Amino acid sequence: MIKNGTIVAITAFFLTACGSTPKPAPTAMEKVTVPAVNQVATAFLGERMIITGYGYYTDTLTIPTFDAYAADFTHAKYYRSPNSDTFMAKGEPVTINNGYGSPLSTQSWVKFTPGKDDICVGVMNCYSATEMSAVYSAEKEFLAKPDSFQQAIEYNGKSGSTLKFTYREFKDDMARGTFTTDFTIDLDDGKVFGYKGSRFEVISANNSRIEYKLLAPF
């Protein structure tokens, strides 16, 4: 049994894949659902268990806070743009300084080639990734296009035989408040449930985690 509940709101930008779900190789922009249909996945309390969005899979570069003469960096994770050596972050964590060390401008991107040590913020302005303690990860993460339509179901725990969830819709980098709804399902009604066109099978669940299999996407 599914019951509608309280309307809530949230802002979001990046979609991260559900725990223990295999991630495909990076591709161009496409509509993607995580996890894949018929794959067993795990989500913990407060995590998204089903995600559909328009975007792509990409490797990442994390740069901690680092102060240099010509540029300063605020801790941020950068996501590679498709088919390029440009990595983009949310916001503008890079500050470009003038010859006196004073801020001139800010930017959201760096240039980096995996396997090399240079992180560049301009044609002649490069720094050692090792010296910066930057961390490159080849593990692919799903990056949603900010102005695309996205849907997600989050797991909110278990009480008795009742499982609690939140359904959210996103557009233009913002949650659509009137399309964000809490709902519940009762395990006494079975193991297979549907919501907004998606269908999933509950394999096991407790108040901190749920193991499930997606049968049909949104």
Image (cartoon, rainbow, N blue to C red):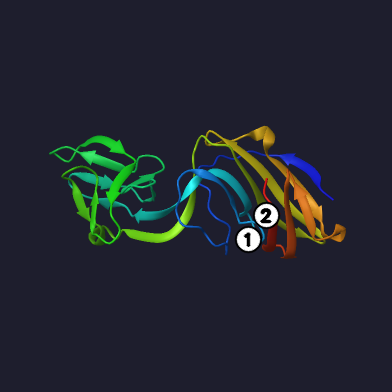
CA separation, marks 1 and 2?
7 Å
Where residue 156 appears, x then y in whole percent?
A: 69, 54
Query: Foreground: 154 or 145?
Result: 145
Query: Is 157 above or below relative to 99?
Result: below
How far from the left and from the top, in percent, is residue 77?
A: 39, 51
Q: Earlier along the polypeptide chain: callout 1 or callout 2?
A: 1
Residue 152, x across and y down, in percent:
63, 46
Picture quarter with the C terminus: top right
Q: Left or right of 39: which side holds 136?
A: left
Asked if residue 128 is positioned above or below residue 92 in the image, the reply reads: below
Q: Secondary structure at mark 2?
A: strand
Amino acid type shown at disc 1: Phe
Residue at horizontal 48 percent and vertical 43 percent from the top:
29
Q: Residue 130 placed where, x, y %?
A: 25, 62
Residue 200, can we see it?
Answer: yes
Question: In the image, 12: left or right of 169?
Answer: left
On screen, residue 116 versus residue 183, left or right, reads left
Q: Residues within 10 Å of mark 1 (few under 14, many from 20)?
A: many
Quadrant of res 40: bottom right
Task: Tell which of 27 and 181 is nearer to you.
Answer: 27
Q: Is residue 205 visible?
A: no
Residue at (15% x, 45% y) in the render? 124
Q: Secondary structure at mark 1?
A: strand
The residue that label 2 is drawn on is 155
Residue position for label 1: 44
Q: Quadrant of residue 177?
A: top right
- Circles 1 and 2 in contact, beta carbons < 8 Å: yes
The 10 Å Cα crowd at callout 2, few under 14, some 14 to 19, many 20 or more, is many
Q: Kindly identify the amino acid type of the residue bearing the numbered disc 2.
A: Tyr
